[in-house]
Image (tube, rainbow, N blue to C red):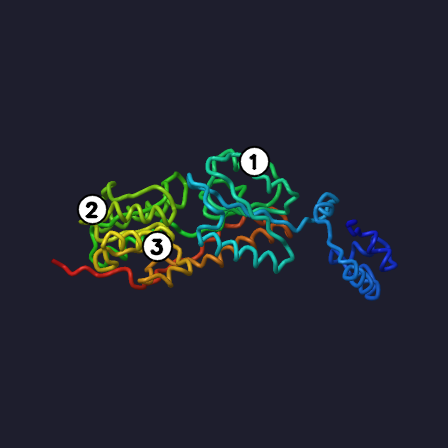
């Protein structure tokens, strides 16, 4: 089928191509109401779909935003296997759609230092989640579009960040367990990498132990991947090799859910034998059995905030990205996976 063009619309409406362009680009004040009505009717009759690529090449905005999620684990996980990212993307997409923008979602494999192909599609801006090699950020600067980072502690004023206080969250989770009488507390987490979210939560864990006068035991840190499967593996290792551990802080709810299953498979009861605290408060944390005690962040709101910051930079100029980093509030969601130990 022949692609319908802007010239076809102008001929059907009996107006100039310039008038059609004004209407399609939201500048109806340049034409009469009668002309605008003719153009909209012709667009509907011809089922005309604007060519966003051609519009971007012509110097107008493409209305496209790139959203990049890191594939941080060795196994090739599905892009949205972690429900945390699903929630975050929902917030981003909703805010973009309200302003007439569209989202291109893609992943970047572990260790990849090159600019993702989606960044080359005449994007008006980009939202990047997670941490990458330094060369990746150098590539981003060359794109010359506004960029907002989520869950990144890169110290570079070129980028705006939307984050939470991950160190404080790790501290809150561990302190809750300490306040309930636990002293042998494990941490199950992804790879602890410099300037990453996992490292910050690990540092919060260590701070809570130190503040309480508890010894930090590196054997109690189970570090591999942010996955349900690793939560199961760590639970088996804890049950088999560390009967003295009475509580676990999991650095994400996805890991915590794996822990619940793994502990149950090993014959351990939660919270009677082992208490568990997660991080994020994804929807399934309220649905599992028992419901998970976790550090709550408003994931959807973070996505909306990141999109809002980016849209402001697009509309007002990149200098608007020079604002202070946005840090959203954390709180504990107390449910049924933590039990107070009775003093000896």
Which mark lies nearer to you, 2 or 1?
2
Q: Quadrant of residue 215?
A: top left
Q: CA distance from mark 2 to mark 1?
A: 45 Å
Q: Earlier in the sequence, mark 2 or mark 1?
A: 1
Q: Which mark is residue 139?
A: 1
Query: How many residues crowd mark 1 within 10 Å: few (<14), some (14–19), many (20+)?
Result: some
Give the quadrant of the C terminus: bottom left
The residue lying toward the viewer, choosing from 91 and 212, is 91
Q: Position of residue 249 (x, y in %)?
A: 30, 51
At a point 32% along the width and 62% down the height, the residue shown is 289
Q: Position of residue 244 (x, y in %)?
A: 18, 49
Asked which secondary structure carries label 1, the reply is helix
Q: Is residue 202 left or right of residue 101?
A: left
Asked which secondary structure carries label 3, the reply is helix
Asked which secondary structure carries label 2, the reply is loop
The residue lying toward the viewer, choosing from 221 and 75, is 75
Q: Which mark is residue 242?
A: 2
Q: Position of residue 269 (x, y in %)?
A: 24, 58
Q: Position of residue 179 (x, y in %)?
A: 23, 58
Q: CA distance from mark 3 to mark 2?
A: 20 Å
The residue lying toward the viewer, choosing from 288 and 184, is 288
Q: Earlier in the sequence, mark 1 or mark 3?
A: 1
Farthest front residue?
A: 1
Q: Which mark is residue 238?
A: none
Mark 3 touches mark 2? (CB < 8 Å)? no
Which residue position holds label 3? 257
Which mark lies nearer to you, 1 or 3?
3
């Amino acid at each position: 089928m022949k692609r319908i063009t802007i010239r076809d619309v102008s001929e059907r409406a009996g107006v100039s191509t310039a008038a059609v362009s004004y209407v399609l680009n939201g500048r109806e004040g340049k034409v009469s109401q009668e002309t605008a009505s003719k153009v909209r009717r012709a667009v509907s009759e011809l089922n005309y779909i604007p060519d966003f690529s051609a519009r971007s090449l012509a110097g107008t905005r493409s209305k496209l935003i790139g959203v990049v999620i890191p594939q941080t684990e060795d196994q090739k996980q599905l892009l949205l296997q972690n429900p945390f990212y699903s929630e975050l993307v929902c917030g981003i997409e909703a805010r973009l759609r309200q302003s007439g923008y569209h989202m291109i979602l893609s992943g970047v494999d572990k260790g990849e230092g090159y600019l993702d192909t989606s960044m080359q599609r005449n994007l008006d801006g980009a939202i990047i989640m997670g941490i990458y090699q330094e060369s990746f950020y150098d590539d981003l600067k060359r794109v010359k579009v506004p960029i907002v980072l989520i869950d990144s502690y890169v110290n570079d004023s070129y980028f705006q960040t939307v984050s939470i206080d991950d160190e404080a969250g790790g501290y809150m989770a561990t302190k809750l367990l300490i306040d309930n009488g636990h002293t042998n507390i494990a941490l199950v987490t992804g790879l602890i990498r410099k300037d990453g979210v996992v490292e910050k939560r690990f540092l919060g864990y260590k701070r809570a132990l130190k503040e309480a006068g508890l010894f930090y035991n590196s054997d109690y840190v189970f570090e591999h991947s942010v996955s349900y499967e690793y939560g199961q593996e760590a639970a088996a290792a804890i049950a088999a090799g560390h009967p003295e551990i009475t509580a676990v802080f999991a650095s994400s709810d996805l890991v915590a859910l794996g822990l619940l299953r793994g502990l149950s498979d090993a014959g351990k009861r939660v919270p009677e034998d082992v208490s568990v605290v997660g991080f994020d408060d994804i929807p399934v944390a309220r649905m599992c059995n028992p419901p998970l005690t976790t550090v709550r962040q408003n994931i959807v709101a973070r996505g909306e905030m990141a999109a809002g910051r980016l849209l402001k930079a697009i509309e007002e100029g990149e200098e608007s990205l020079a604002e202070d980093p946005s840090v959203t509030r954390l709180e504990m969601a107390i449910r049924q996976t933590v039990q107070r130990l009775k003093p000896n």
